[in-house]
Image (cartoon, helix red, strand yellow):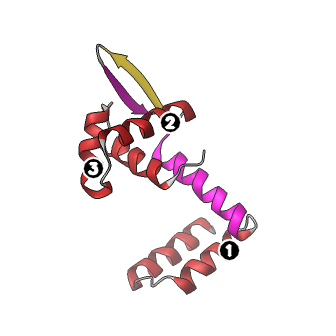
Amino acid sequence: MHLSDAEWTVMDAVWDAARPVSARDVHGAVAARAGWAYTTVKTQLDRLARKGALQADRAARVTLYAAAVTRSAARRSALGSLLERAFDGAAAPLLRFVVRERSLTRKERAELVRLLRKEGR
């Protein structure tokens, strides 16, 4: 499932809440940093529900939204898409790119080495 940058912003707010949320809840969580109007948030929520990323439950006069996909599943999908588009489906070139092009801290490099050793067993 492909998520746009705006959809990631909304999904992050829903995942962080860890409970069903209203459009007002999400608007309150993202408005300051995103600068979005309530209607923009509502549009994004409805779009995500149509995509199957959110479940929408209308209770009384309020629709409550809950994540239908986990953050981990969304990340896995995004990474798979990036690997296919930019690295011909191969993880090694991606890792090489990250190590060479990003300023990894000593701690991040050590963690990467530890993970590779652990998974290589």
Q: Nearer the viewer, residue 85 or 93?
A: 85
Q: Is residue 116 above or below residue 10?
A: below
Tag 3–tag 2 contact (CB < 8 Å): no
- Report which quarter residue 64 is drawn in: top left
Residue in the picture at 39% in, 80% down: 107
Choose mark 2 or mark 1, whichever is in front: 2
Crowding around mark 2 (Cα neighbors within 10 Å: few <14, some 14 to 19, many 20+) is some
Q: Amino acid at mark 3?
A: Ala
In the drawing, what numbered circle is on residue 92?
Answer: 1
Is 85 placed left or right of 100 in the picture? Answer: right
In the drawing, what numbered circle is on residue 31?
Answer: 3
- Find out whether residue 69 is within the magenta segment: yes
Q: Which residues are magenta?
A: 62-86
Which quadrant: the C terminus?
Answer: bottom right
Which residue is labeled 2 in the image?
47
Q: Position of residue 45 (x, y in %)?
A: 42, 36
Q: Is residue 42 above or below residue 116?
A: above
Q: Amino acid at mark 2?
A: Arg
Residue 59 visible to the viewer: yes
N-terminal-most mark, 2 or 1: 2
